[in-house]
Amino acid sequence: MRLNLTAAAIVLAASALVGCAGSTNTQQAEQQQGGVASEQVGQTEQVGQTEPEATATTSDDGGVFDAKMREYGLVDVSTLDKSIKVDLKYATTDNFVGKDMYNGLRKAYLTKETAERLVAALHDLQKVDPKYSFIIYDAARPKSVQQTMWNLVKGTPQQQYVANPSKGGAHNYGIAVDMSLTYGGEPVDMGTKFDNFTTDAHTTNELDLVKKGRISAEALKNRLLLRQALERHGFKVLDNEWWHFNSCPIEEARKNLRLLDF
Ligand SMILES: [Zn+2]
């Protein structure tokens, strides 16, 4: 074991969520005073949109989505720490839909505050052991991609795992990150893969998962290590996805930040 389990198992009291305010997105949010109603109009327009020009982009700066992300004030998290790996699963066919839905986007964008807190969590962890780092499977997700996903899962059992694009989920505000831990550059055992839509991925009763042999004690230790590092910096994990962390409550994001409406 790389860390002792007792230390990793300490439940942190100081896990109160930090706010989403102070982003460069705030001013622009005011221009969107139509709120949900205007988003719904946007949603209708987005259906079936393919943006073929984005797929042809080969520059290092990526496609149309990259330019838009920067326009919305988001930050490419790997520029803040080079040890962070990015493997956007929805930009490959290795995802639950089996399609590349990211139109040339290959970088993990987050709000500046979210990215900075994520890197602060990483640096805490690297003080314990510098071989640790993060791998990011998904970060900011444009609303048009959310719509594509929604259309594909609507009416299927997977629907519960995809936020309805009409209001926008946490990924659509750049405050959510799907991620895991690496050690020496390799992803560690977390008990399941990313986007495993079974109870084995749940974070609510993990000791039971270990007892039943669904996940290993090592996997639980790794989950707790990742979670506690992030919770110290105000992130909160989802109940049904060990890999998904929000940097602030979605209600707060909807109030203060701009939906990635492209
Ligand atoms: Zn997620």
Image (cartoon, helix red, strand yellow):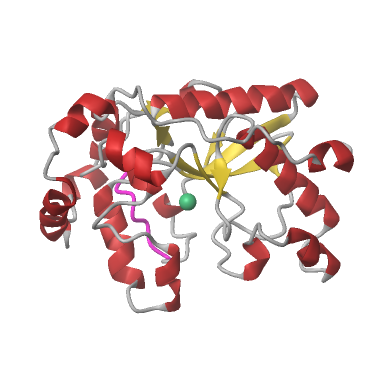
Determine which quarter of the picture holds residue 111: top left
In the displayed structure image, the side of residue 13 where residue 163 appears, left or right:
left
Q: Is residue 222 above or below residue 14?
A: below
Q: How many marks?
A: 0
Q: Position of residue 59 (x, y in %)?
A: 31, 30
Q: Name the residue at 65% across, 57% down.
A: 203
The segment highlighted magenta reads: 98-105
Q: Position of residue 16 (x, y in %)?
A: 57, 35
In the displayed structure image, the side of residue 41 where residue 104 appears, left or right:
right
Determine which quarter of the picture holds residue 174: top left
In the displayed structure image, the side of residue 158 where residue 11 appears, left or right:
right
Q: Name the residue at 39% across, 45% down.
A: 250
Q: Position of residue 229 (x, y in %)?
A: 67, 33
Q: Name the residue at 63% across, 61% down.
A: 202
Q: Is residue 252 above or below residue 90?
A: above
Is residue 104 rendered magenta in the image? yes
Determine which quarter of the picture holds residue 27: top left
Asked whether the viewer can see residue 1, the reply is no
In the rendered image, the quadrant that contains the C terminus is: top left
Is residue 134 rendered magenta in the image? no
**Secondary structure predominantly adopted by residues drawn in magenta:** loop
Q: Position of residue 51 (x, y in %)?
A: 17, 50
Q: Nearer the viewer, residue 124 or 255?
A: 255
Asked whether the viewer can see residue 59, the reply is yes
In the rendered image, the quadrant that contains the N terminus is: top right
